[in-house]
Amino acid sequence: MGLQGYNPSELVEILWPYFCPRGNCGFVPGLWTSTSWDGDAKNGADGIIDLSVAFKLPAGIAAIAAMMIIVDETVAVTATLSSISGAMDGFDQWTQVASRYIEVAGIVVCDANGDIYFTQSGELDAVYIRIVGYWS
């Protein structure tokens, strides 16, 4: 079963038994947005996203449930959220059709500081990131 195409509420419901086998996992639901990730164009934006600064989340969190929306006039431009550059512990998406918004949702493991890493393969016309919950 792939998780692409589910909205964040469905993801939490689907994944809850895997992350919280005893019902106490420290998950905090909510909606956090950032003016740095609200549809701005990104060109060479690879790097750490300090979640405590950009999204006002507590420092040192373990993981986030997030949604990312991207758009570009070029097909096959990718954007990735992960714990560090090149890690396979998050999710990525690519522009599948020129100038069409594409959304992906999933869980991203945070680094030791509670931050995540953003990587892109080329210029993107717009990137939105919304965090819908976190694990402490």
Image (cartoon, rainbow, N blue to C red):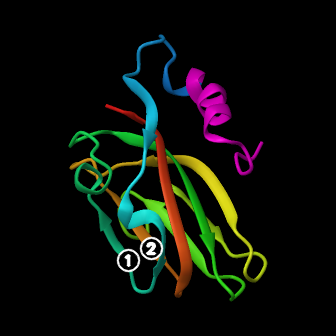
Label 2 sits on a secondary structure element that is strand
Of the pair 43 and 22, the residue shown nearer to us? 43
Q: Residues within 10 Å of mark 2 (few under 14, many from 20)?
A: some
Residue 110 spot, x, y in % from top left: 34, 49
Q: Which mark is residue 46?
A: 1
Q: Are marks 1 and 2 in contact (CB under 8 Å)?
A: yes
Residue depicted at x 56% and y 81%: 125
Q: Is residue 81 shown in magenta?
A: no
Q: Which mark is residue 18?
A: none
**From the image, which quarter does the C terminus lie in?**
top left
Above or below 26: residue 56: below
Q: Residues within 10 Å of mark 1 (few under 14, many from 20)?
A: some
Residue depicted at x 69% and y 76%: 95
Residue 45 spot, x, y in % from top left: 38, 79
Of the pair 35 and 94, the residue shown nearer to us? 35
Direction from residue 42 to residue 70 in the image, left or right: right
Residue under label 2, please give it: 119
| Mark toward the start of the polypeptide (1 vs 2) | 1
Residue depicted at x 70% and y 45%: 3
Q: Quadrant of residue 46?
A: bottom left
Q: Give, as a single range, the part of the protein colored magenta.
A: 1-17
Above or below 75: residue 58: above
Residue depicted at x 45% and y 33%: 30
Q: Amino acid at mark 2?
A: Thr
Label 1 sits on a secondary structure element that is loop
Q: Quadrant of residue 117?
A: bottom left
Q: Is residue 16 shown in magenta?
A: yes
Residue 132 spot, x, y in % from top left: 49, 39
